[in-house]
């Protein structure tokens, strides 16, 4: 069994020609000042690639190097090493060997003290392997989630909720930072949700359990399950910290609250709905203080980005971003605001909730409980001499009419609307009661969008297509491009929780309101309007933009088909 031994990392790298003597001298001086390990100093200062360093250490020590991105992790086996030891010694159990031996990955395989302590804690023969520290830390978060601790808290809570217990009454009078089991249980769920990059958390009471599910990259995943007996306490606690009516269990309620998770502020929007087995609760997570996106980083095609920039440069009229709930519409609006923000413009937003805080912009939070509605705020906003107004959503006729009037009278109005595609926007606004002639005079651009999951960078590779996927490509991009297109798919790994996807990207279709389209709207000629819109969008629908991402290797054909299944392709 190979044993760790002390080696001089700096000399090894200099001898291998990977580091100059001057660079080593500077790194050693930095190490002396900061107290960090030399390897970490070299990596963080950009003097050597972390994976290359780990490989060289493994080769020098005569032990194997393991790339955790592609190594299957047995969570039960890995948990044989307590989390505090794993994080303290930067180590993880990776596999078994022989009858009772364990292969243990070490970020610093030269650390003899760590090796001795790990051998003692695991009480078996240990074989070291070299692993990259950044990969290790990311994997530790997945291996040591709070599930076990949550189960213990759930059992503790269940015991306190015995028939003769006054736990529910205690909860009603508890403060926001108390240490009751239910408060600690929810804190653990919030932390897991932030680690998983969840956009929503679902608490779903059922006959025999309380299911907790996370929505990650648009897809729901089971996270954990608790005994159904604690469902009422969980719902009560969430209503309490949201300032909702804890006595009302028959009607839906909505609210919001803010928590601190891992040192960061997270805004939570809460929706409570009565169901057969109890109150179902859904939380929407919004990170406070996160940076607003920029237009250049939205990933639009060059043609659509140029159309958007031209529309906002006019300084008047209405620009609408459309799509279903959760399609990234608000993110796009903030990117436009960021582009327009300067000292010459007065920008005012009317939102529910405020998702990004932007300096230099007046942002107003809608509050229906005190009748501070979109329409009421918008009427007041127009008396504040704005140049640009952003309305979070055109929810009703009154809001839409005020927004259109503002656009007609020389303001630039940005807003969102729920429609399936760009051409359907005019019909939706007409149904809401907006006069067609005002729509024709105000509407400048409609941008429809969706969000698609992007392939995991760690496990994505070239992949063939099924007959159904090939048929979709033929219908979308034609035989010439479809037959020669190289497609990719994710295999699933520890970095993406086996899904093959990590993160999301937007796809768009952009309808510019030309003179022909405006005339058709003013004359309420639906046939002429749809004909002009379809001619403009031919070859540039949502499905075509999805095919662009497939061709670029950003997503898979299966994901493109799933997201655009109901969208028009052939015009």
Image (cartoon, helix red, strand yellow):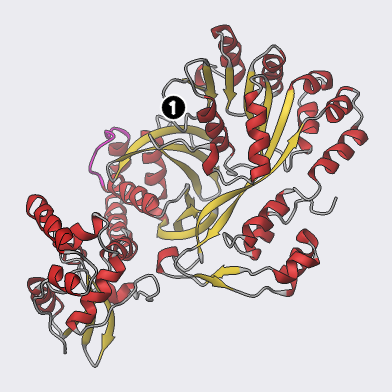
Segment tinted magenta in the rendering: 172-180
* Label 1: which secondary element: loop
User: x%, y% of residue 93?
Assistant: 25, 75
Seen in the picture, residue 220 relative to 411 is either above or below; the reply is below
- Residue denoted by label 1: 358
Residue at point 87%, 37% (across, down) = 532
Q: Quadrant of residue 528?
A: top right
Residue 19 belongs to the span the image colors magenta: no
Out of 179 and 430, give the one closest to the viewer: 430
Out of 156 and 272, give the one closest to the viewer: 272
Seen in the picture, residue 238 relative to 45 is either above or below; the reply is above
The 10 Å Cα crowd at callout 1, few under 14, some 14 to 19, many 20 or more, is: some
Seen in the picture, residue 430 relative to 301 is either above or below; the reply is above
Seen in the picture, residue 414 relative to 482 is either above or below; the reply is above
Residue 178 belongs to the span the image colors magenta: yes
User: What predominant SS class does the magenta segment belong to?
Assistant: loop
Q: Quadrant of residue 61?
A: bottom left
User: x%, y% of residue 27?
Assistant: 15, 57
Q: Is residue 350 visible?
A: yes
Residue at point 78%, 19% (across, down) = 441
User: x%, y% of residue 60?
Assistant: 19, 80
Q: Residue most toward the bottom? A: 99
User: x%, y% of residue 290?
Assistant: 40, 37
Q: Quadrant of residue 245?
A: top left
Quarter of the rendering occupied by the N terminus: bottom left
219 horizontally vs 74: left or right: right
How many numbered marks does the figure carry? Answer: 1
Residue at point 74%, 25% (across, down) = 443
């Amino acid at each position: 069994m190979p044993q760790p031994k002390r080696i001089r990392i700096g000399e090894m790298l200099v001898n291998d020609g990977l580091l100059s003597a001057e660079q080593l001298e500077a790194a050693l001086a930095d190490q002396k000042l900061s107290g960090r390990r030399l390897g970490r100093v070299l990596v963080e200062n950009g003097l050597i690639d972390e994976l290359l360093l780990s490989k060289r250490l493994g080769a020098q020590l005569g032990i194997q190097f393991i790339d955790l991105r592609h190594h299957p992790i047995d969570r039960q086996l890995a948990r044989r090493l307590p989390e505090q030891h794993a994080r303290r010694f930067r180590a993880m159990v990776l596999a078994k060997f022989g009858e009772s031996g364990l292969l243990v990955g070490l970020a610093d395989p030269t650390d003899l003290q760590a090796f001795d302590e790990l051998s003692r804690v695991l009480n078996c023969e240990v074989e070291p392997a070299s692993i990259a520290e950044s990969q290790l830390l990311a994997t530790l978060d997945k291996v040591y989630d709070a599930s076990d601790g949550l189960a213990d808290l759930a059992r503790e809570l269940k015991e306190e909720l015995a028939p003769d217990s006054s736990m529910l009454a205690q909860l009603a009078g508890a403060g926001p930072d108390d240490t009751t089991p239910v408060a600690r249980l929810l804190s653990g769920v919030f932390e897991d949700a932030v680690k998983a990059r969840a956009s929503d958390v679902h608490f779903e009471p059922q006959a025999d359990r309380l299911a907790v599910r996370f929505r990650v990259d648009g897809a729901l995943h089971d996270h954990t399950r608790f005994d159904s007996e604690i469902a009422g306490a969980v719902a009560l606690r969430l209503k309490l910290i949201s300032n909702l009516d804890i006595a009302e269990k028959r009607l839906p309620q909505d609210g919001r609250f803010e928590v601190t998770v891992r040192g960061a502020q997270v805004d939570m929007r809460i929706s409570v709905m009565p169901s057969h087995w109890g109150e179902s609760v859904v939380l929407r997570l919004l990170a406070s203080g996160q940076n607003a996106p920029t237009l250049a980083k939205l990933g639009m095609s060059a043609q659509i980005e140029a159309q958007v920039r031209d529309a906002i440069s006019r300084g008047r009229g209405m620009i609408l971003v459309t799509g279903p709930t959760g399609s990234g519409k608000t993110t796009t609006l903030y990117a436009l605001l960021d582009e327009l923000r300067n000292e010459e413009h007065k920008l005012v937003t009317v939102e529910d909730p405020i998702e990004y805080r932007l300096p230099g912009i007046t942002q107003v939070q809608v509050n229906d409980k005190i009748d501070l509605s979109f329409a009421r705020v918008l009427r007041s906003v127009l008396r504040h001499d704005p140049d640009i107004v952003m309305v979070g959503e055109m929810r009703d006729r009154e809001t839409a009419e005020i927004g259109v009037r503002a656009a007609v009278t020389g303001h630039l109005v940005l807003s969102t609307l729920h429609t399936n595609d760009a051409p359907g926007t005019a019909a939706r606004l007409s149904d809401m009661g907006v006069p067609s002639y005002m729509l024709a005079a105000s509407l400048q651009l409609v941008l429809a969008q969706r969000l698609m999951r992007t392939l995991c960078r760690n496990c994505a590779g070239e992949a063939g297509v099924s007959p159904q996927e090939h048929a979709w490509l033929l219908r979308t991009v034609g035989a010439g491009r479809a037959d020669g297109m190289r497609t990719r798919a994710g295999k699933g790994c520890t970095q993406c929780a086996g899904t093959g996807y990590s993160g999301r990207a937007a796809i768009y279709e952009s309808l510019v309101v030309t003179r022909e389209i405006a005339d058709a709207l003013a004359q309420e000629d639906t046939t002429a309007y749809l004909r002009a819109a379809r001619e403009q969008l031919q070859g540039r629908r949502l499905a075509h933009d999805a095919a662009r991402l497939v061709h670029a290797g950003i997503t898979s054909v299966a994901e493109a088909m799933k997201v655009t299944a109901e969208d028009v392709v052939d015009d």
